[in-house]
Image (spheres, rainbow, N blue to C red):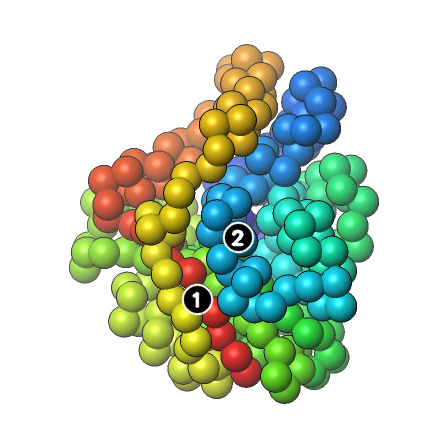
Amino acid sequence: MSDSGIEGPDAMDDEFDTMPRWTVEAIESLGASHAIPAACRGSGNPAALTWLADMMNLGETTELVDVGAGMGGAAEYAALTRGTSVLLVEPMLGACRAATQLFGRATVAASGTDLPLADGGVDAVWSLGVLCSSADQLRMLEEMRRVTRPGGAVGLLVYIKTVADLPEQPDGNEFPTRGELIDLVRRAGLHVGEIADLPDFDGPPQVWQQQAQAVDDLVAREHRDDRRWQVADTQQSTMGHLIGDGLVLGMLLSLTP
C-alpha cells in the first residue's frame, strides 16, 4: 500500500520508494516464486483477494485498475488467477519500477486523487490498503467512481480504527472509523454491496508467509544499518502493533458506481 494522494513525508518515501528497490533485489536473489507474497504487503491475502475478486466478478474480459498498486502483487494475483487485464497506478516511482521489474505489467506513475483515465473508461477499479494514506480520501473515492463504467465494480480494502483515539499511528496515515468510511463511500456516489472484515478470512498459506518472511529477512540483513530501513521498519512495526492489538483492522468492500 502507498500514499495515493500527494507526496508523503520522508517516512513514507522510505517505506514505499526505497524499500521496493531493496525488495526486488531480495526477490531476484531468492527466486521469482517469492514475488507475489512479498509484493502483497498490506494488500490482503489470497483468501481475501479471492473473495473481493468474486464480489467484483473479475474475469478474463475484465480490465482492472489497481489504484495505489505498490509493487503490484495484488494485481498480479488477479491477473494469474482470473486472467484479468491489469493497469497499475502508483505515485511512488520506486514502487512503479519494482512492479515493472517483477511483473512487467502496464504501470502509470500518478496520484489516486487525479487518475489519468477517461470518465467511465474501465470495467473495475480496486484500491487495497491505500485510502488511509491518501491526503484527500473523499477525492480519491470520487476519482475511482468517475473512471468506472456504469455497471462496473469498485473494490476496497481499507484499514479502519476501532477506537476513537489511537495511541500511535504510522506517519502519513489517517484511519477512518467504520461509520466514517461508509459515509465517505456514499458521499463519493458509490453504492455498498458486500462487506467483510479481513480477520474473518483464513490467513496466508504457510508457504506464502515463509516466502514473504524470507524476503523481509534478507532485506533486513542487507540494510538494517541504513537509516531508511530503520524508518520503514518503524512504520511497518507501528502498523503491525495496531493490527495485532485490534485497534486497526482491514475492512473489505465491494461497491458499484
Query: Could you say whether the residue bearing mark 2 is in a helix, strand or loop?
Result: helix
Residue under the image location 43 percent in, 51 percent down: 172
Residue with the mark numbered 2: 49
Residue under the image location 71 percent in, 74 percent down: 122
Q: Is 88 left, or right, of 140 in this rendering?
A: right
Residue 91 screen position, x and y as percent = 65, 55
From this viewpoint, is residue 233 visible?
yes
> Label 1 amino acid?
Leu
Is residue 166 shown above or below 66?
Answer: above
Residue 2 screen position, x and y as percent = 54, 50
Q: Nearer the viewer, residue 34 or 241?
A: 34
Q: Nearer the viewer, residue 56 or 64?
A: 56
Residue with the mark numbered 1: 253
Tell me the CA gap for discs 1 and 2: 11 Å
Is residue 142 shown above or below 164?
Answer: below
Residue under the image location 68 percent in, 41 percent down: 94
Residue 106 screen position, x and y as percent = 79, 55
> Label 2 amino acid?
Leu
Is residue 228 shown above or below 51?
Answer: above
Please report whichever mark, 1 or 2, sits nearer to the chain's N-terminal start: 2
Residue 54 occupies quadrant: bottom right
